[in-house]
Image: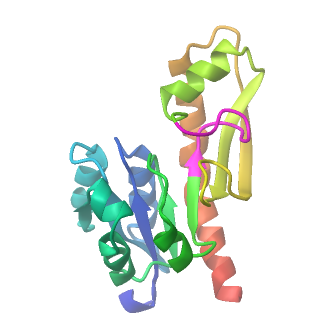
Amino acid sequence: MEPKDKKNIVIFASGSGSNAQRLLEHFEHHPAIRVAALFSNNPKAYALKRAETFHVPALLFSRDEFINSDKVLEQVQSFKPDLIVLAGFLWLVPQNLLRAFPNRIINIHPALLPKYGGKGMHGLNVHTAVVQAQEPESGITIHYINEEYDKGEFILQERCPVLPTDTPEDLAARVLQLEHQHLPLIVEQLLAQQNKA
């Protein structure tokens, strides 16, 4: 398949970017899908370096550019994304992007929504809350995004046990395995469905 015929993914990440890394690896030699670009709001995000390692354009933006202008929207549109994947991205996505890409922006959340979602619920904050509540299980939720944190329609939930001896870090490692296992496959499925639509 010619590069121009491939489906394009754009990733948004705010931090280390291990899910971004997983997507970059999975689609590096994929016959039909490629990671076209990675965007970050954090100049210290290791995700930017991960993208550069794979020779994928890595773009940095400010809150003002994201929320008060169309600059980020226009940059994203230039990569003609078929799907936008939020992989550890911590800001609410503004209306201009939601309108431009309806049902084409997905997020991965490290808990079983609707529990343990919302503003501030990311990273170890989530796993600490789950462990403190003595939940018997946790997991991941992959979902479409809308105007509110973690409120969009679910695409997939996968579960894992929370053990009585777990620290938040133990649980984080177990949940991350689920994230890395399922996110690339869901991206493939969604893009395959677009082909049929």
> Does the stretch in magenta take in 60?
no
> Does the stretch in magenta take in 117?
yes
Which x, y percent locates residue 128?
Answer: 57, 19
Q: Residue drawn 65% across and 13% down? A: 132
Position of 114 relative to 63 (above/below): above
Res 3 visible: yes
Q: Residue drawn 44% across and 50% down? A: 91
Which x, y percent locates residue 26?
Answer: 46, 61
Q: Is residue 191 left or right of residue 19?
A: right
Please state which of residues 110 and 171 is positioned toward the viewer in this rendering: 110
- Furthest residue to the top? 165
- Furthest residue to the front? 68
Please state which of residues 162 and 3 is positioned toward the viewer in this rendering: 162
Magenta stretch in the rendered image:
108-119
Position of 19 relative to 51 (above/below): above
Q: Is residue 196 left or right of residue 176?
A: right
